[in-house]
Image (spheres, rainbow, N blue to C red):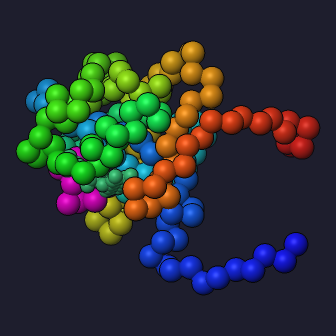
Amino acid sequence: MNMVKKSFPLRKVYGLLEPGPVVLLTTAENKQPNIMTMSWHSMLEFEPPLIGCVISNRNYSFDLLQTTKDCVINIPTVEIAKKVVQCGNSTGATTNKFKKFGLTPIPAKHVSAPLIDECYANLECKVFDSNMVEKYSLFVFKVVKAWINPGANTPRTLHHLGYGRFMIAGETITIRSKMR
Ligand SMILES: Cc1cc2nc3c(=O)[nH]c(=O)nc-3n(C[C@H](O)[C@H](O)[C@H](O)COP(=O)(O)O)c2cc1C
């Protein structure tokens, strides 16, 4: 194979490597919940599960997180793609996104932030390490409780390619014989 490659702009590189799926991060203060769309996240440890997330200090969610030190990472599917984009293009500082975009908050077990009922999986998280927040807006969260819809076999999650384009997952293959 001889693939002819062309130069690719550095500003678009994130769209190639973004791990996805796009998630909805919920936070809450004084029972006022908020939702933020987020795709810059990465697993850091198996168990307890640790997740690194970049949350800009320009976002209202950043302030709520700094106060409560907890959140929920909710994993949406293509059925609510439009709401995912709307949550990423408005701020909880002036909008109640649950009400405006018709999403349902469910109380979490261990954190102040709510689960989003319409998402197929929900991870209750506590801030584990904030050493890199000042420099990179990078929070390390520990998952303290995880929920999943047992009926979601092949969830059609969203993966951001940049500029509002999304790839949709949906096919599962198993290559167990080659796994160590
Ligand atoms: C697909 C998508 C992915 C995004 N990923 C991130 C992210 O990883 N980190 C971040 O800080 N903002 C991200 N944003 C932007 C926030 O969702 C956006 O600034 C939002 O309005 C913040 O809401 P808040 O002010 O209520 O916290 C993303 C937006 C979209 C549409």
68 with respect to 47 (left or right): left
The residue at 57%/62% (across/down) is: 17
94 with respect to 78 (left or right): left
The residue at 63%/23% (across/down) is: 153
Q: Position of residue 141 (x, y in %)?
A: 41, 44
Q: Is residue 56 magenta?
A: yes
| Res 69 seen here | no
Q: Is residue 73 magenta?
A: no
Q: Quadrant of the C terminus?
A: top right
Farthest residue to the left: give it.
94
Q: Position of residue 162 (x, y in %)?
A: 44, 61
Q: Of residues 158 and 19, which is closer to you in this image?
A: 158
Residue range in magenta is 55-62
Q: Of residues 129 and 51, which is closer to you in this image?
A: 51
The residue at 33%/25% (across/down) is: 115
**Quarter-wise, where is residue 135 in the image?**
bottom left
Q: Of residues 80 and 95, which is closer to you in this image?
A: 80
Rendered position, 28 above or below 61: above
Q: Main secondary structure of the magenta part?
A: loop
Q: Position of residue 77 (x, y in %)?
A: 47, 33
Rendered position, 45 above or below 13: above
Q: Quadrant of the N terminus?
A: bottom right
Farthest residue to the top: give it.
151
Q: Of residues 162 and 91, which is closer to you in this image?
A: 162
